Structures are given as structure tokens and as C-alpha cells.
Amino acid sequence: MDITKEILYAGVNDTEIDLFEGQYAVPDGVSYNSYVIQDEKTAVIDTVDKRKAEEWLANLDRILGNEKPHFLVVSHLEPDHAGSIQAFLKKYPDTILLGNAKTFIFLGQFFPLLSEDIKKQTVTEGEAVCLGKHVLQFFFAPMVHWPEVMVTYEQTEKVLFSADGFGKFGTSDLNGGCTMEEWTGEARRYYMNIAGKYGASVQALLKKAGGLKIDVIAPLHGPVLRENLEYYLEKYDTWSSYRPEETGVLIACASIHGNTAEAAEKLAEILRKKGMDKVKLMDLSRDDMSEAVAAAFYYDKMVLACATYDGGLFPCMEDFLLHLKSKAYQKRTAALIENGTWAPMAGKCMKKLLEEMKEITVLEKTVTIKSAVNEETLEQLESLASELI
């Protein structure tokens, strides 16, 4: 689990958690990563969620023995990373906290009982702190995805401690040994749902990272990345530029009694018959919302199929579109299928929400179902499939 002989892993896995940030399902759990750099001055990089504080402190005991850490680097004040700061300082009260000006503003908000005389050192952009053999250099990453975020570059062993960047859902059992395929799916879902709104900020951080020689990326969630780093950097460049990864179609369906779902299924079938290999059909009433958001960003086209409900949208479709809007969904083509027995309104409502997003091309013709799929519907779906291809 350790990175090098002198940079050791102290993090913990959380397999009891059901929802990350109170909304994202994590069936395989999540890791809270923390690292120890042993040198003339020992530094701990970040703490863990308070629910795992006792286990983490035991890890520090095992690594440090009677040694007292000189520094605690605070990359990010979100509670899943900083939740154990108070417990840490109770055990190691002489440790100096390394953070930036915003770090210490937020620290007081989260931990009002912390004494004003705690030891802290405010670092600036590009500043370096020498531990002995190892040198820590700090680069600010505002709004990736909080304003106080910073990353730490260890110059000697060329390790980038990337905060929430390059993290993924799941535990760190695969630390150092995950394949790119194992990493990508959950890393995409993690990125799009947590940092997706902040593409410009991620791009700015990637430019800073581009000037560094990086051999290892050590995030705060998920495995440490050691090989094929170009692949992971390229994925982050694609995601933060809002470029599609695949030419294909996501069909996102919100159906009440199954008729709208039937139309969505027929469209998927027609598209495949016409040679579109990459077609993903998702039921917004049942499928995981964060998975649907990630899929929308993955493909270059999206079809929204929704029943009219109380003169508007079936709630799961409205929820989906609001999620996409909040994550800065853009640079895609969308098509609409609506259903309504007496006053179809879903198409108009979906188009209105899409128009609030950037660079979304909505195909002109909306497929309208009057209650159930019929021959006219099938003809419209054939026409829509041809236009999408």
C-alpha cells in the first residue's frame, strides 16, 4: 500500500457507508486516503472522515511509533478529508497545520472549539517547505471543487498529492494495481457528479500539473496511480473540456405506465439496426441518477423520453435535467420524445431546460406519443433514428 520507502499510506476504507456526500450510492465503499512522509520533519498529508478517525489514528500509531509529526498538510476542508483534524490535534497538539488563507477561515467554521493558539503556517502559491530530503511545493486549485483546495507536489520523489483530483469511488484495495478499465468507470461517475461543474478550474490545475515531472498521483479517494499516467491526465482533460468520449446515444427514459418506455426501447432497437453500436437505455425511475449523469457526459448524443405529468415533466426527468444543468452539461446533441394523453407538454418543458445549458443542439422534430405507441409513432422514431445517425 505504501508509495515509497519514506512515503507511507495511512488511509482507511469505509465499507459501511451507503451514500457518499449524502446522495451518491457507493456499493463498493470509498477510501479516505492519508499519507505520511518520514524525514527530518515528518509530514502527514490529510486526515480522514471522523467516522473512521479511530482506525486512522491507529494507522498513524503503527507508522509513527513514538515519533511526533511536525506538519499536517490540509489539502481540503471537506469533512470526508478533514473530519479528524480535531482528534489528530488532541493526540499531536504540537503539530503545525499547513494550509492557505482560506483553509484557516474554513477550519474555524468546522471546528469552532479549536483553540486560537493552534500552530499553523499559511502557505502561498508555489511556496516550498523543506522536510529534509523531501520538499513539498503547494499549488492552489480553487474551485476543484471548493475554493480552498490545494495540491501538494513532493519534488524529490515526484509525487503529486492531488486532493480530490483523480479520485474514484470504491476502496483502495486495488492500490497500485488497478487497471485503467477498473479505474475509469467509477472515476468518471465521481468526477462528473462532484467536480463536473468546475471544468475551467480543473483545466487551470492541469496546466499547472503540466509543468511538473510526475511519477505518482496520490489522490484522496481510490487507488494511487503509478503507471500510464498520460491516460489518466488525458481523461481529466477530456472530462474538464466537456468533450464526449464516445460517438453514441444515451436514451434517458421517464415512463409512468410503460408506454413511453416502449417508445424508448423501440428507438434503441431501430438505432442498433441502423448500425449505431453504442446505444445505452436508462430508466430514470430505477437506474442510479449519478450513473445516468455520467452516461450523458460519456456520449455525444442524448434522447430524452418523458411522459407529461401534472402539466409538466415526470419528476425523475426534471431531476435528471436539473442535475445535468448543475454539472454544466454542454456541447451535445439532444432529441426529444414526449407522451401525453390530452395535453402533451413534456417536450416543451424539456426543451426549455436544455436551452438553459451551453451549446446544446436540440433536434427540431419532437416525437409525440398520444398515450401509446402506434404506427405513426414508429414512423417518427425511424425518422429520428436516421437524423441521430
Image (spheres, rainbow, N blue to C red):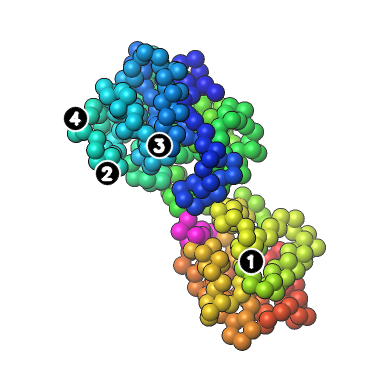
> Which quadrant does the N terminus fall into?
top right
Q: Nearer the viewer, residue 214 or 345?
A: 345
In whole angstroms, how far apart are the C-alphas of marks 1 and 3?
39 Å
Task: Give the foreground label among 4 and 1.
Answer: 4
Q: Earlier in the sequence, mark 4 or mark 3?
A: 3
Residue occupying image coordinates x 49% and y 46%:
20
The x, y position of residue 245, in whole percent, is: 61, 49
Residue occupying image coordinates x 51% and y 22%:
3
Q: Which residue carries the number 3 mark?
A: 50
Q: Secondary structure at mark 4?
A: loop
In whole angstroms, how far apart are the C-alphas of marks 4 and 2?
16 Å
Task: Give the foreground label among 4 and 3.
Answer: 3
Residue 69, placed above or below residue 27: above
Q: Which residue carries the number 4 mark?
A: 117
Report if the CB atoms under discs 1 and 3 are less than 8 Å apart.
Answer: no
Extreme-right residue of the structure: 273
